């Protein structure tokens, strides 16, 4: 890969948007998909804080799912998916690659159910999200298992106390060049306090009959944040949204949920290529 520039490297301070509660004291919600006009997409606000973000470049192997709830994977082969523009083609070509990666990478994993994906492009329907959040909570993770398991009986078996289940997003850039604009930041789960994780009702259109739950994040100075400078298409970040082992005392899993956000790096050059990315969301089962 030949490029005529060097993407920003090293630690950096940038502004992050954290959770601010609804002014009327009501429970926070977020709307997904199409909803009646006039209804605000969410009823909570944001508060901005300057955050030190550590560059994980050169320390990629230092992070684990059990401690940090994120993991960096490098040197992945080119995908058999040609363009990442057609959802059916992505499911056919890229999903099996993601499943294989998770089975090979996550210790004890023996079953993977991929349930959706999102592509983000500067001028696309979905764009990078500049707000600190977690995609799932304990409640919504169990709900996902019941929704996507082959049968109610299988769901209850997979949710049994002896079973370990997780939700892991596999995130990668789609740019041909290293990422410059809107990089992804992620906080080590071991530094995220439970009281700073705020459940948010995630309401889908009424005709779907589905209400999920995400989490917004309050700022705390002890949170330790990272990004991977100049991330390339042969690298992946595993973002663990939930791990059932984290609910068990003495398991050694430190939270099992990674807060993350896109951010504006103040060093980004004018005219830098916008970030393109895909995240594939999967239920991962095993010991």
Image (spheres, helix red, strand yellow):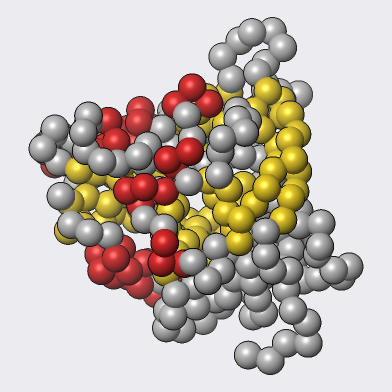
Identified at 21% across, 38% down, the residue is: 251
Q: In the image, residue 202 lies at what x, y percent?
A: 52, 30
On screen, residue 267 versus residue 178, left or right, reads: right
Q: Is residue 1 visible?
A: yes
Q: For residue 9, which quarter of the picture?
A: bottom right
Q: In the image, residue 114 lies at what x, y percent?
A: 34, 55
- In this rendering, the answer to whether 111 lies above or below 129 is below
Q: In the image, residue 254 lies at what x, y percent?
A: 35, 39
Q: Nearer the viewer, residue 217 or 175?
A: 217
Q: Please count the marks in the image.
A: 0
On screen, residue 137 versus residue 109, left or right, reads: right
Q: Residue furthest bottom?
A: 2
Identified at 67% across, 65% down, the residue is: 10
Q: Is residue 99 visible?
A: no
Identified at 62% across, 47% down, the residue is: 261
- In this rendering, the answer to whether 93 lies above or below 48 is below
On screen, residue 57 versus residue 156, left or right, reads: right
Q: In the image, residue 150 lies at what x, y percent?
A: 19, 46
Q: Nearer the viewer, residue 246 or 161?
A: 246
On screen, residue 275 versus residue 186, left or right, reads: right
Identified at 55% across, 44% down, the residue is: 224
Q: Quadrant of the N terminus?
A: bottom right
Q: Nearer the viewer, residue 10 or 48?
A: 10
- In this rendering, the answer to whether 168 lies above or below 62 is above
């Amino acid at each position: 890969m030949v490029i005529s520039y060097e993407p920003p490297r090293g630690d950096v301070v940038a502004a992050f948007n954290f959770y601010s509660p609804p002014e009327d004291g009501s429970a926070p919600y977020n709307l997904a998909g199409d909803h009646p006009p006039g209804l605000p997409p969410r009823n909570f606000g944001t508060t901005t804080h300057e955050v030190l973000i550590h560059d994980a470049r050169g320390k990629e192997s230092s992070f684990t799912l059990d401690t940090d709830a994120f993991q960096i994977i490098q040197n992945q082969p080119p995908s058999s998916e040609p363009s990442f523009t057609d959802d059916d083609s992505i499911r056919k070509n890229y999903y099996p690659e993601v499943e294989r990666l998770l089975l090979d990478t996550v210790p004890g994993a023996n079953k993977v159910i991929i349930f959706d994906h999102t592509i983000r492009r500067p001028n696309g329907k979905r764009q990078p999200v500049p707000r600190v959040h977690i995609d799932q909570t304990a409640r919504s993770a169990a709900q996902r298992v019941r929704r996507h398991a082959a049968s109610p009986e299988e769901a209850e078996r997979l949710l049994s106390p002896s079973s370990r289940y997780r939700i892991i997003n596999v995130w990668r850039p789609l740019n041909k060049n290293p990422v410059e604009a809107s990089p992804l930041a992620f906080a080590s789960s071991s530094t995220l306090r439970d009281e700073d994780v705020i459940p948010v009702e995630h309401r889908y259109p009424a005709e779907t009959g589905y209400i999920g739950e995400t989490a917004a994040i309050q700022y705390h100075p002890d949170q330790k944040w990272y990004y991977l400078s100049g991330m390339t298409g042969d690298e992946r970040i595993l973002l663990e949204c939930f791990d059932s082992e984290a609910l068990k005392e003495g398991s050694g899993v430190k939270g099992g949920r990674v807060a993350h956000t896109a951010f504006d790096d103040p060093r980004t050059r004018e005219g830098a290529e916008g970030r393109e990315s895909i995240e594939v969301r999967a239920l991962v089962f095993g010991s």
